[in-house]
Image (cartoon, grey):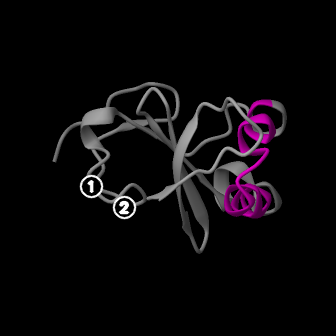
C-alpha cells in the first residue's frame, strides 16, 4: 500500500492501494475498507483515486459522499494479504462473518 500524505492536516487515513476497478483504504484503526465500482460506483472510486494521489481530501470525501458504500471491510490481522483479493478473511459489508477457507 502507498502511504497517504494527508496534506490537509489531521486525517484518519494512513495508506491506500489503487487497483483498476477499486481502491483499498487503510485507516488509523488499521481496518482496510475496499471500495469498488460495483458497490461504490465508478465515478466515486475514480475520484477517490485522484484524491489519494493528491494526498488531500480523501477522508472528507469518504465521510460526506461515500459513507457506508464499501465492498469489504478487512480486519487488522488480515491486511498483510492482498487487500483486494478474494481470500482476505475479512468481513463482508454488513458485519457478517465469512467462514474461513
Q: Residue at x 32, y 34 (%)?
A: 76
Query: Closer to the camera: disc 2 or disc 1?
Result: 1
Where does the image place residue 95, in percent across and percent down from the top left? 45, 24
In the image, residue 26 sits, relative to residue 9, either above or below, namely below
Where does the image place residue 55, in percent across and percent down from the top left? 70, 53
Q: Main secondary structure of the magenta part?
A: helix
Judging depth in this view, the residue of 64 and 8 nearest the camera is: 8
Outermost residue on the left side: it is 101
Secondary structure at badge 1 equals loop
Quarter of the rendering occupied by the N terminus: bottom left
Secondary structure at badge 2 equals loop
In the image, residue 22 sits, relative to residue 62, either above or below, namely below
Residue 62 belongs to the span the image colors magenta: yes
Magenta residue span: 45-63
In the image, residue 3 sits, relative to residue 93, either above or below, namely below
Residue 5 belongs to the span the image colors magenta: no
The residue beneath circle 2 is 85
Residue 13 badge: none
Where does the image place residue 86, in percent across and percent down from the top left? 34, 58
Crowdedness of circle 1 by 10 Å Cα count: few (<14), some, many (20+)?
A: few
Determine which quarter of the picture holds residue 36: bottom right
Q: Is residue 77 left or right of residue 67?
A: left
Q: Is residue 43 left or right of residue 45?
A: right
The residue beneath circle 1 is 81
Judging depth in this view, the residue of 21 and 16 nearest the camera is: 16
Q: What separation in Å lies between label 2 and label 1 (alpha carbons)?
A: 8 Å
Amino acid at each position: 500500500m502507498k502511504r497517504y500524505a494527508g496534506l490537509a492536516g489531521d486525517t484518519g487515513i494512513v495508506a491506500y492501494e489503487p487497483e483498476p476497478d477499486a481502491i483499498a483504504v487503510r485507516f488509523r484503526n488499521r481496518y482496510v475498507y475496499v471500495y469498488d465500482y460495483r458497490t461504490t460506483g465508478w465515478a466515486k472510486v475514480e475520484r477517490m483515486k485522484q484524491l489519494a494521489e493528491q494526498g488531500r481530501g480523501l477522508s472528507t470525501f469518504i465521510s460526506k459522499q461515500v459513507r457506508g458504500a464499501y465492498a469489504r471491510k478487512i480486519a487488522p490481522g488480515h491486511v498483510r494479504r492482498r487487500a483486494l483479493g478474494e481470500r482476505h478473511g475479512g468481513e463482508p459489508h454488513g458485519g457478517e462473518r465469512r467462514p474461513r477457507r
